[in-house]
Structure formats: C-alpha cells, structure tokens
Image: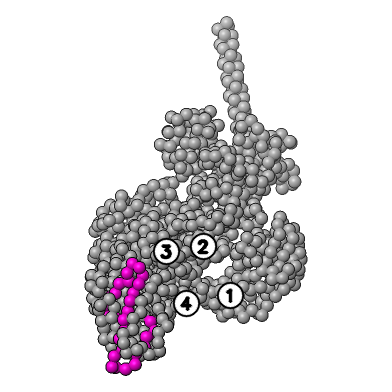
Amino acid sequence: MRQFRNKKGQSLVVVITALTMLFIIGLAFFVLSQAERVSSIRHLDSIRARYIAEAGIAYAQQVLKLDRNTNLIDSLKDITYEHFKGDEVDLDQDGQTESRWFNVNDSQGNLCGRFAIKITDEASKMNLNSTSIGALKQLCSNLGMDSAKTNAIVSKRPFNAIEQLGVILGKDDFKHSKDFFTVYSLDKEIDLDRRRRSYLNSTSAQVLLEAFLSAGINNAYQKAANLKDASDGDLAQTVFDKFVLGNLAPNGLIEPGGWRNVGGFYEAQAGSSAGRFVWSNLALEDGEYFCFLYGPDASDVVGEVEGKYIYSGDGLINKVKVEGGGFSLQIKPAKDRLSRFSHIELEGLAPKSGLTRKVVTGVEAVVINELMVKPAKEITIDAPDILPAETFRYTFTQLKPGDYYIVVLAKKTGGLVGDVTIYGDSASNLRDGDYFPLVRNVNSSGDLTIEIKNNSLGTSTFRGIKILQEPDAEFIEVLNLSPSEIDLSKFYFEVFNLQGELVPGWPGRIPDGTTLGPYQYLVFTVDNTDVAPTPVRLRNNGLCFKKVWGFNGTGLIFDEYSDTIDKNFDLLPDVGARVILRDASGRQVDAVEYQGFQVSDFISLERGCPAIKSDSDGNGFFDGWYASEDKNLATPSSINENIGMYTFNQQTGERIKHSPGEIIVFNRNLSGLSEVLELSSSRNWEKFSILDLSRMADRFSSEAVDLNLSGNYKGGDFKEIKGAFESTRIGESGVWEFSDIHTGNYLLSISSENFSAEGQRIEVSYKGSQEGEFSIPSSLLFANGIAFYGRVELTGDDLCPLQLKIINASDVKLRINAIRLEPVYSVPGRININTAKAEVLKAVFDSDKLVNNIISNRPIGMKDGRKLGIGELFLLDEAYLPFYNSLTVKSDVYEINSRGEYFKNNNTLAYQTIRAVIERGD
C-alpha cells in the first residue's frame, strides 16, 4: 500500500515538474517574442529616424543648390550656414550647440520627427594631399602637433579618407584636428560668370585675347599680345587684327538721371541716379560688340554698369547690341565719388562694316632698338654762279672728324663741277652727284678743303658737297629684353620701302653662332671691318663701321647681293622704310618703320621705352622714334639717350632716366600672376597694373602640369639631344611614363622645339590607369608649334600614372620638348578665404596682417558687383599675389551632418546621425 502511495507521489512530482518546465518554456517563448517585437519596433523606428536624417541631407542639398543660384561666391553669411544655424543641437560634439531643429510631419500633418543639419565647407579646410608640405607642417604646428606626428602625416600622403589621420594622431588629437583637414576639396575651373577659366600660359593667343576682352581689361589686345609673347618659348611676335570704331561720344541722354553735360563730357555727383545714354546713326552693321568706356582722364571713374564699377578704359562684361545703327546704355554714378564719362570704343573680333582694321603686335624678347639711317650730310655754300677758269678753293669747317665718301654738287642737276682735288688726290670732270673716287678724312679740327678747277668741257658750277658714310656705317641695333641668352643663328632682316617693295640688297642674314646675352645690345652692320662678310665692292675702301665707331659690330651676310652692293646702295632708305627681323623659320620677331621726316643727318633713330608700341597708323609697325640726343648723335651698343628714356615724378618734379632692365620678356611659361605684374603694358615705362591682375585672377588659372620628359622616358626610338627628344624617321616611337598625377580630366598638348615640327604629323595614344590598354592612336598635326590631343581621363586613386606613346608619322626629323596637361574641370585643394578658419589661413600666409585683412573684409569677391573673385584680394594688398592659385572664393564640396529623430506622442523613440560628403554641382 505504501509502495503504491510512493509511486503515486512520484508521478505527481513528475507531472508538476513537467508542467513547470512547460510553463518556463512557454514564458521564455513569450518573453522572446516580446523582445523580438520590441526589437522589430525599435529597428523600424531606427529606420524611420534614418529616413528623417536622409531627408535632412536631401533638404540641405536643395539649400546648397539654391545658394549656388543666388550667390556667385560662398561665405559664412550665405543661406547655406544662416538657414541651419541655431542653439538647440550640438552635432559635432564639441560641447557647443550650433544647429537648430526642423520638424517633420506625416501625411496627416502630425509631428513625426525632426532633423538638425550642420554644413561644413570642405574648401575651408586644408587638403592633406595637395597642399604644399610647408603649409601642411605649419597648420600641424598651429594645432599643437609634435614634429613626429607632423612628419608621419607628410610621409603617409596620399590619404583616402580623413579618418586615416586617427591612426597617426590618436583619438584625442584627431578629435581636436579633424575639422581642419580634408581630402575632398575641389575648385572648379570656372569663373564667377560660369565660364571655363583660361590657362595663363595658353598656347592660343586668341584664347588669351578673348579672356582679356571678356574681363573688361583696358588695352586688351596689346596686353594679351604681350602676355603671349612673354610666356611662350619662341621669338615669333604675336599679331592680332583689331577691328574697332573709336571715340564715339553719345548723342545725348534719353534719361538724364544725375548726369549733366559740362562741355566735352558728362559728369555726375556721387550717389546720384542712373542715366541712359544713347548712340544713333552709327555706320555699323547690326550685331554685338565689345564696349570700352572712357572718361576725359585716364584716372576717372565712369560709374556703374550692370552692377560693375567701370574705370576709364574698362570694358563691359557683356557685349552691347547695335540695331539699326544705334543702342543705349544705362550708367549709374558711383556711390562714393564723382563720375565722369566722355566716349566709348566698340570692338569686334572679326571684320564688320563700319569697323576699322588695325594691327596689334606683341613685345618679343628681341626688339629693333636703334637705326642709323642717314650717316650723311649735304653742305651748301655761297659760290659764284659760274666758277672762274682758275682753281676755286673752299674749306668746309665744323665737320665731324672721320672718314667719308665725298659727293660733289653742281648748281644744275647733272651739271659740270670740274676737276676736283682733295688732299692731293684728284678726279677729273666730276658732275653733279658724282662720288670722289677715294674715301677722304675730315681731320680732328673738323676741316675739309676742296679744290675745283674749271676745264674745257664747259661751264662749271659748284654749290657744295655731301659727306657720307652710307651704306658702310648704316646699322641696325637689337636689344634682348629677356634674362636668357638667345641664339640668332639664321635670323635675318628685310627692308621694304613704304610701298611694300623689298629694297634692293636685302635680306641680310645674321651669321650662324651669333648669340645675344641677357639685356645685351648687338649692332648689325653693312660693312663691319672692311673685310668679308662685307659686300665685295665695299671692302678695303678705308670706310667701315669699326673705323667710325671704334668697336666691332656684327656684319650681316647679303647672300644674293654680296657681289652687287656698292656705295650707291642706300640700304636704309633716307625717305622712309620698314624693317623686319625674322627668325630662322621666317616668322616675324619685330617690325618697325620710319618716315623721311623723322630722319636727320648723322643722328640715329632710337626707341624710348623698348616695349612701347607706338603705331600712328595702326599698320602693326612701330614708328614712335626719337632722335638720339647723345653727344655722339647715336648710341650703338649702349643705352639710348633721348627724351623717351625719361619720365617725370609728378610729386617731386624729378626727371628719372629709365633702363631696359626694367622691362622683362620671360620667354618661358609664367609661374603665376606675380610675374605678369612685371610685364610691360606697352605704355611708356608702364607695366601691367595691380588692377589688371585683379581682373585677370578669376579668369585665368596657372594650374597645369608641365611633364618632365627627360626623367620619364621609358624607351623607344627617340633620342634625347640637348633637352629635347628627337626622331629622324617615320614609324619611330617613344614611350614616356609619368607618375603622381591627380586623377581627373585634362587637355593634352605636345610642343615641338622652336616650331621645328610645323606641319608634321604624329600619332599619340595614352593609358591613364594602372591597368588597361593604350587608347587607339590619334593622328595629330603640329600647328604653331603645338599638337593638340584633346581630353584625356586619368582614373583610379587620388594620384595615378600616365603613359604616353608618340609615333613619328612624318618622314622628317621631329624634335619634341614639352608635354602639358591642363585641367578641364576642377583643381584639388584650393582654400576658400571666405569660409576658412584663422588657423588654416595662418598656415598659408606668413603674416598675421594678411590673415586679419582677409577676415575683416569678408566676404571677398563681389565688392561693387565687379566679380573680381580672388582678384579682389590684390586691391587690399599685393602681397597676396603669390598665393592666388591656391585660393578661391567659391566652394563645390561640402560635408553635411544630419541628425534625424523619430517621434511618437511627443516622445523620441529613435535617432540616427548621417555624415555625407557631396559635390554641389552647378
């Protein structure tokens, strides 16, 4: 019985245990299902919070695009920053609230969440990969990093993400420093008018010209030509056709505003209302024209047009449209000063009815600096109408000592003079215009005695003599305005009369091996030392350049006329001529002309400022000569002496003599705008102004990659000879490989040495990544010394290699000396001066003054509506010039931090934070 009860009890225990376990299992399943339900709800809430954060990102992107459409520059005062600013949220966890909440409602209008946004300009930071090592180290120092960490950062470049800094710096230092560095910043190569920037060292003169015109730079044609000639490596003078209608005063005012006619020009007081000027009955073809405005004085402010301040000589950004022979222009007087306006000039790039063609030439490194045209003088005396039968003697006095040809003159053209004796040597039966057969010397006292005997041939008359040193002592002096030696081998001169016909005797070739040192003068002569290469009939006659001037010049070689030229040749015609210097390829280096009225006896024609481009008739030939005022009446091989060499200081009244060393033609690519400031504007001893550069800065970029050929040749048939690579046969090829080029799109061009490949053809292919094959070869033709390939795309990491294969496709010698990449779209690493923190700016500039100047004048780039961009800095201080190509006033890449929160019953159920780096786009 007890055993049965025990079994019964055991069964009960088993049942209870089983039920307990089942309860526990059931409870566990219940708890687990509840947990999964809560987890699912929380996950769903988190997804909702993320969607809200993503909505914040999308909203921020729209604000960025709105800002781009509203503002041409980017600053901390833009809607980009002001719209999201607040004191409710600390998104960057620096202990300070900087953002505000934006509520999000559901489709029923009920509050379901909110987001907060912080936008950071990547251009406000320093780019780890593209910034100079010096600036990068300086910023690290400014942030308190030790040298070990700084050097580690420099050695680890390039970085793919900013978080890689954390490995080097550690958690605390990274948190302190991360907002000062970036790897994402890009600046698009477009100006504030959304046009692609031009390359400062552009191979196309027309590109430079159009950029100058569109920037409204005064004297645009001349300055563009000078820039091109200063920045290329050849000696070929840039020549522009300029089509212009100038000095157009308005017919009147249809809306006077604050303007009034004060006799010869219009004037308006500061801050007065705008007026509208009208031009009518213009003999002009309908169309659009570049328009330049002038006041009565070069220093005048004309006023404000289309939101831009216009100074005298400035051009409008937009062309004016002429219809039916007329147009109108609204000019608003300046806000802060008197405005004065007198006339306009209309210009076109192509011929149109009503425009006058003028030729503008640039300043090359070699200029024709001095001409000795007429080393001769006619001296008349008061002699009897008919010479007596006995000997007539006359002594000419106060002559310049030296050796001369002597020509006798009768009172009647072709008339008889008689038998002439000079210093014991005689010639019989000389007539008017005949040369005495021997060169004669005027002694140190300046006297020359001549005896004339009448003879049986007829009645003799005598009215005087000509003393001449032409053509033997005629000379052309050239000057090197560059800091480099120039090889003039095979260069030559041509001389044309004013009707355009080649003067007999020319061309005259410069001997092989002739070089011209930096700022050196070189005198080219007809008869240097009375021996070869002097023309045969001028040799050994006792008269030559060296005897006249006491030193050697360089004798020209008159190949065609070497046996013909004699003392009767006037190689530099006294009545006027045009002189052209050409290089070995026949391209014009310099061209000058002179008129007969400018020529004086024994006095040379000299330039004043050697870069001035005086051209009275606009035919492209310099004609602004001065008569030499030197005691010797000429200055061969030395600095000129004439009034054009001097200027006056208006404040002190001091007369200042200038030197050609003040002018520079680099004859190489310019490193930046700082070197443009050293170039001549072709006005008397004036250079490009800081105002010119301020207008150029936003239109030009000096960001290009000139690839070093010598150290990167990988092999092939080309041979390196004196810095260039040479191929001599068709089908020969060469391969070059260049490393560490920033990824992106570029324009590729290949240059031949000194235009030597003109008209030749090459085939070019490239490979722009580590993998892949060469592109299909493109056939290119050299024109003006350049073969343009066009666009190449380099892909991969931040830095990548470029391989280039070139095949000689012409059966002649080919010499290549340069390969260039110009960015098409964007340049990494430029710093926006309007958004950068002081620590970043102090790492770029070595002066607190420059940093404080920027901060106190922000935003920079659009003052007075002039759209100067970074150029506005130059008007604050010229010291910013060297940095211009590493700075910007606009931004394209931003970091957006968005925190999204999901609500229910006014309770925050979930939040998500998203960080995105985006390129805003246009």
Q: Name the residue under label 3.
A: 631
How far apart marks 3 and 1 lie (CA) works out to 44 Å
Judge whether residue 774 can be spotted in this image.
no
Q: Mark 2 points at which residue?
A: 684
Q: Give the magenta part as a residue range.
A: 436-464
Q: Mark 4 points at which residue?
A: 597
Specify the amino acid type for callout 4: Phe
At 73% across and 69% down in the image, what residue appears?
261
Q: Mark 1 points at which residue?
A: 245
Asked whether 135 or 310 is in front, the reply is 310
Query: Where is 739 relative to 547, above or below?
Result: above
Specify the amino acid type for callout 2: Asn
At 37% across and 66% down in the image, what residue appears?
477
Specify the amino acid type for callout 3: Lys
In this rendering, the label closer to the viewer, 3 or 1: 3
| Mark 2 element type | loop
- Callout 1: few (<14), some (14-19), or many (20+) C-alpha neighbours within 10 Å? some
Q: Which colour scheme is used?
A: one colour
Q: Residue 137, position in %: x, y?
A: 47, 36
At 57% across and 38% down in the image, what residue appears?
848
Specify the amino acid type for callout 1: Leu
Query: Where is 55 relative to 357, above or below?
Result: above
